[in-house]
Image (cartoon, grey):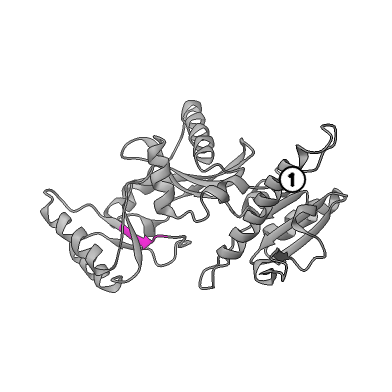
Amino acid sequence: MKKILILTRFRGEYEPRRLAEEAVKLGYQVDKVNYEHVRIGVSKLGKPIVDLGTGNKLDEYDLIIPRAATKRGGESMLGVKSVVLEYVEQTRTQELKNSRTRDSNSERKSVKVINGESFKFFPLMGKLEQGLLMAEAGLPVIPFVSFRGQRGWKRYLEILGKRKGEFVPVMVKARFGSHGKNVKMAETLTRLNKLALKNSEGDVLIQPVLRVRRWYRVLVLNGQILGMMKHRQKDKFQVISQQEELSKIKPKFTKEQIADLERLSLAAVKVVKADFAGLDVAWDEETKQWRIFEVNRTAQFKWFEKAFPEVNVAGKMVR
C-alpha cells in the first residue's frame, strides 16, 4: 500500500484535509503530522532520530508533502522542516550508495518529496530572495529595496532626498509573508518619514505603487498550469488619485498576452526549482507587461477548487 506523509502546522486546514481525502480514495495510507509533534534527537549509539509518532520511518513513505512550517504570530517550525527534509535526502543518498553493491536488478523505492529540491536549495524564501532570483533570470518583477533598522532608513531617506522629480508613492511591508497585513502606503515623503519612525526595527521591503487593475493567481504542478484565477487589485493598494482612473479599465488580454503570462509562470517556478507553487502575476498598466508579485511554494488552493470544481488540485498532487 502506498504511504503518504503530510507535514503541516494546521492538520485541520483545508489543504491537508483535502490531500488526505484524495489519497484515501486511492487506497493510500495517509499520516498527517504537525511539525510541533516531530521528535528529533540523537541516540546513545550516535544515530539520528526523527520520530513522527506514526509508527513509520521517513523512508517508508512513498510521498511526502511538506506544507508551510510558519504561521503568522506563531513560532517558526522551519528548523524541524529542514531537518526532516535533510534526513530524507541523506537516506536517499545512502540508499543510492548501497544500491551499487546490490544486484543491478534489485530496486529500492525512492521517497518523493513535493518541492523537495526547492526547499533544499532555498529553505527560506522571502520576497527579497524571490525578487533577486527572478531578476537574475531576466523575469519581470516589482522593483524593491530592503533594509533593516534606523541606519537603513537613514541611508534610504538620504538617497531619496537627493533625487529630482516628484516623489513616487511606495508600499512599505515586512520582508516575509504579510498576507496583506501591516502593509502601509506612503503617497508623500512626509508620510514615508512617519512610517520610518514607526518601523525603525526589523526588516522592511519597499516597493513602488504600480498601476494595476488585474492580477492572476496561477497554480502550477509538475511543469503544467492547473488553472488561473483572475482578481481585481484592491483600492487600498492603489494611490487615491489613480483609483477612479483604474476603476474604469476593463481588462481584456489577447491570446498572446495570456500565453506570455503562462510562460512567465512556468519559468518562475523553474527558477525556484519547485514542483508545486501558486503565483501572483499582475498586469502593469504603466509599462504594459506582466510582473511577478510572488511565488508561494505552499500555496493554498481552497478557493481555487471551489471556483473550479472540475480541477482536482489535491487529487493531482497525491497521484
Question: Is disc 1 placed on a helix, strand or loop?
Answer: helix
Task: Name the residue tied to disc 1.
Answer: 95
* Observer-nearest of 154 and 60: 60
How far across and how far down the image is residue 204, in percent?
34, 62
Task: Tell me, yes or no, if residue 115 can be seen here.
Answer: no
Image quadrant of residue 35?
A: bottom right
Q: Which residue is found at the position 68% from the left and 53% from the top?
A: 88
* Observer-nearest of 192 and 154: 154
How far across and how far down the image is residue 42, in percent?
67, 68
Magenta span dominant secondary structure? strand
Q: Which residue is found at the position 71% from the left and 69% from the top?
A: 43
Q: Amino acid at mark 1?
A: Glu
How far across and how far down the image is residue 154, in percent?
19, 64
Q: Which residue is found at the position 44% from the left and 44% from the top?
A: 214
Looking at the image, residue 43 lies above or below residue 210: below
Per the rendered image, the range of residues in magenta is 171-175
Dot 1, crowdedness within 10 Å: few (<14), some or many (≥20)?
some
